[in-house]
Image (spheres, rainbow, N blue to C red):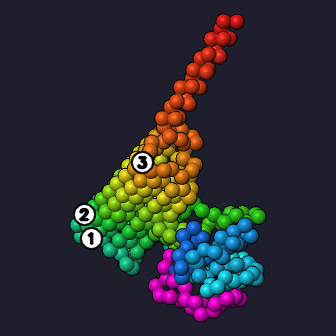
Amino acid sequence: MNFESPIPVKEIASWIGATILGEDTIMAAGINEIHKVREGDVTFVDHPKYYNASLQSSASIIIVPSTMECPPGKALLVVEKPFLAYEEIVNRFRPVQALNTTARENYIIDPSAIIEPGAIIGQNVTIGKNCHIQAGAIIRPYSYLGDRVIIHSGAVIGVQAFYFKKWPDQYQAWTGCGRVIIEDDVWIGAGSTVAQGVSGDTIIGAGTKIDCQVMIGHGVVIGKNCLLAAQVGIAGKTIIGDWCVIYGQAGITQNLHIGDRTVVYAQSGVMNDLEGGHTYFGSPAGEAKMKFKEMTALKNLASDVIKKKENK
C-alpha cells in the first residue's frame, strides 16, 4: 500500500513506540509485507530465520523485535512485537471496513455500466465503461474494475485474504490493505472469489476469462488473456504469465512463477515454478508427455504383475 504522501520515520516510530536505529530522516512511501517490498517501504520481521532477507530487502524501514546492526541507508524500528506494530500502521490508513452501500467516498461508476438489481457495490470502488455486474455479485471496498468487465452472479471481488499470523494460542488475521485490480475485458464466472491483496494488489490481467467457482488468492497476479476453468485454485502471491490455460480443478500453490503460454491440465497439482510454453499434468505436475509415459509404464507394470500371479 502506498501512503498518500511520504511520512517521516520519526512520526511512524512515535505511533508504535519504537526506538530508531540507523537513518532517522528517511521518509516512508508505503507499507508492505516482505514479499512485496519496494524502496521506501515499511515492513517487519519477527523471526530470526528471516532477519537477513528482510535487512537485505528493498525495504527502507524495517520493524524488528530487538537491537541489531542496521544496513546503510535504512532505518530499524525496534519494538517488542513487530507484527502488532505493522497492524497498527495498516489500521491507521485502511482498517477493515464493513461494506457500506450508502458511502460514496471515491465511488466511481461509469454511466454506461450495467448494475443489476441485487448487486452490491461497496465504497471506494471504481467501475469502468460498459461493465456488467450481475445480480448477487459483490464488489467490496477498494476494488478497481476497468472497462467491459463482466462479473457474474455470486462472485465476490475483494474478499479478505486467508492469511494469518500464528501465535502460541491462536491465529490472528492480517489486516489487508491491498486492492483487487481487474483490467479491461475480464470475465469472472458465477460463484468465483478474488481475494484482496494483503499489502500489494491482486491483479487480473486484461482479456482474462475465469470460469465459475474459481478461487484467486491474495496478491496473485494473473497475466493477460488467460483462461481458467471451473474450480481452479491459485494460492497467494503466485504470478501467472500471459496466455496461460489452466483446466478444471487444478491447484497451484503459493509464491510460484508460471511462465507465459503455459497449459496446466485438469486436476493437476502445481508445487514448483513452471517454465512457459509447455503443457503440464499430474500431482506434482510435470511435463505432460513425460507424465503420460509414466502412467503407461505403470499400467504395463501392473498388467505384467497381474499376469504373473494368474499364471502361478
Residue sitting at 60 percent across and 62 percent down? 163
**Do labels 3 and 1 touch, CB within 8 Å?**
no
Label 2 to label 3, Cα distance in Å?
Answer: 33 Å
Residue position marked by numbered label 1 in the rendering: 110
Q: In the depicted view, which residue is nearer to us: 113 or 19?
A: 19
Mark 3 surroundings: few (<14), some (14-19) or many (≥20) residues within 10 A:
some
Mark 3 or 1 closer to N-term?
Answer: 1
The disc at residue 277 is: 3
Task: Please indicate, yes or no, whether residue 210 appears anywhere in the rendered image.
Answer: no
Residue 292 within the magenta-colored segment of the rendering: no
Left or right: 165, with 221 as reference point: right
Residue at point 53% right, 61% down? 237
Judging by the rendered image, the residue that carries numbered circle 2 is 130
Q: Is residue 202 visible?
A: yes
At 58% across and 42% down in the image, what residue appears?
A: 284
The quadrant of the picture occupied by the C terminus is top right
Q: Position of residue 36 (x, y in %)?
A: 54, 70
Please tell me which of labels 1 and 2 falls first in the chain.
1
Q: Quadrant of residue 147?
A: bottom left
